[in-house]
Image: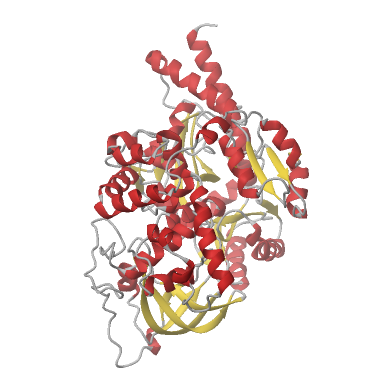
Amino acid sequence: MNIEAQIKQLRDELNEYNYKYYVLDESEISDFEFDMKLNTLQELEAKHPEFADPNSPTQRVGGEVTKKFNTVVHDYRMYSLDNSYSKEDLLAWEQRVKKAIDGEVSYTCELKYDGASISLTYENGQLVKAVTRGDGVQGDEVTTNIKTIKSVPLQLKGEYPDKFDIRGEIILPFEGFNKMNEERIEIGEEPYRNPRNTASGSLKLQDSSEVAKRPLECLLYNITGRDLNIQSQIEGLQKARNWGFKVPSAAKLVHSIEEVFEFIAYWDVNRHNLPYETDGVVVKVNSLQQQEELGYTAKAPRWAIAYKFKAEQVSTRLKEITYQVGRTGAITPVANLEPVELAGTTVKRASLHNADQIAKLDIREGDEVFVEKGGEIIPKIIAVDLSQRPQNSVPTQYITHCPECHTELVRQEGEAQHYCPNYNGCKPQIIGRIQHYISRKAMDIEGLGGETVALLVNAGLIKNYSDLYELSKTDVLPLERMAEKSAENLINGIEQSKQVPFERVLYALGIRYVGETVAKKLVKHFKFIDAIAQASEDTLVNVDEIGVKIAKSVVEFFDSEPNKLIIERLKHFGVQLEVSEEDLANQSDVLAGNTFVVSGVFTSVSRDELKKLIEDNGGKVGSSISSKTSYVVAGDKMGPSKLKKAEQLGITLLTEGEFLEMIN
């Protein structure tokens, strides 16, 4: 087989695997095998640039930087939708439709996904252009970033029109959104507010390799063009599926407004089980000929309407705005509310995010505010009831100095949050860093909790986490609620933490932007703390998944004289600051390409030890069971829902013993 044919075959294979994995949720080969084929294709394309193809699967990893997004006029305008909020609104719309149309009218009901609208243009079955909605007439071209989204086909399947546009939403599933936020909180960053804004912001990132890291998906719902040979909306959706697009299966053809109401009633309850953020239902006249007859208003099609689900919302009084200092010095304003019931829980507090958000909503103490818990995990204030604002109300002045140590706050250009720069003298930062150091995923020091850390700092017994190793039982016994046995357990727990492996120690140090995953990458690459400490920004950036921001933070941490002293003290006390020979000997690639989910109770090893064994042997640890899961390591008392899902997906269950045999 010649080189060109080999390249074409690899592209076709990889496109088909991508389609089955990201659109059909089926897995035919392991991640490892896929990566090997992709690497082979990348090498061949690099050696033979004459066979370059902008729609090759290799383009999905990103890497191209876009300094300026060009404004592009849509070939076909992207209209917005009229909204409805009641059955009466829908009935009135139906009456307008029937008044204009002779004969029977059927409707297609689709879920309204809350994401960033996109228009994709295909010519001869290949993606040639991706443009944001913009103002409906023109938008920004983001083709390079869209190519990194695995559910967007680069080459279509079957028979398709020569040229057409297809519209949809770029969305961020809850699981991916929550994971991104866990990682941001872990490294001291402000969490993203909601999946929709995060998805929208992702499209305008300049570095497409950063977009590729985000678990974005593209759900399609409308085909536009000439000579498409499509007679109805529901037929268009099915054809789009056949061509390789990810089209939600919830779409349904109905023949009366009563069936529309049934669809809405069903999804108003069941939308909470969906993996995506959904804010309503879109009802469309099914016949494209009838759509053409109905036409458009200046802003929206007359043949479609959106029914918006009611977000759970209440009003309550904002008693006070307080400010919290995180372990990285980030300041978070908090709204303290009159307690109110919302979505089954009592809400007393809501994050105000930052100074810009307070100014935007003009939130003031004493205001009656509207609190919502829609697709959000944390309640948020969405508006102020100005009709109830007290006469003597004064605008909120954001604090200028740290509420704890009174150091003047700083705000870096391009950042939303204010920071207290008093790294070594601000008590909440000191307490927060030590609390992070002793936490379960870090040093996991038995007998020492967050409250005890605060007592130790306030009593002047410790000023940083290296001081923990000088504590004696007589030091801690005078502390509040500290008995003889608990004091003994605390000192023993600190002593035992000296055996915690290096990757967890590095994470425990609390370097900004260095979460669990980054810590593992750094340890695997450098092996010793001194090697990391001496590494330049350029050296660090060359490590897998380490960007400029992380590299700068690592260099800054190890350039600090107080931090250097703390590291030397940790070495002196015997904390693990290098990879042990045993760990090096125990690492292999025997599980490469496989994803494991660990569930249940185990006897010979703990859950955390099992996860470490998986990673040490080249496997990935998954948080939940999906079609991407290779094996489930099942212990006693495995949850029945997980067991059922594993059986439904045909995933192999391994006992503890079978897994240990696999790696031995």
Q: Do we see residue 187 in this rendering? A: yes
Above or below, 310 relative to 641: below
Side of 356 relative to 345 (left or right): left
Q: Quadrant of the N terminus?
A: top right
Above or below, 458 relative to 521: below
**Residue 588: image x %, image y %?**
57, 29
**Residue 318: image x %, image y %?**
42, 83
Residue 319: name its quadrant: bottom left
Looking at the image, how many numbered discs can be counted on the residues? Answer: 0
User: Residue, x 57% and y 54% (percent of image)?
Assistant: 276
Residue 255: name its quadrant: bottom right
Q: Along the line of sight, which residue is nearer the eye, 173 or 291? A: 173
**Residue 390: image x %, image y %?**
35, 91
Q: Along the line of sight, which residue is nearer the eye, 19 or 505? A: 505
Side of 85 relative to 73 (left or right): right
Q: Quadrant of the C terminus?
A: top right
Residue at the bottom extreme?
391
**Residue 403: image x %, image y %?**
30, 75
User: Residue, x 38% and y 40% (percent of image)?
Assistant: 546
User: Residue, x 43% and y 80% (percent of image)?
Assistant: 336
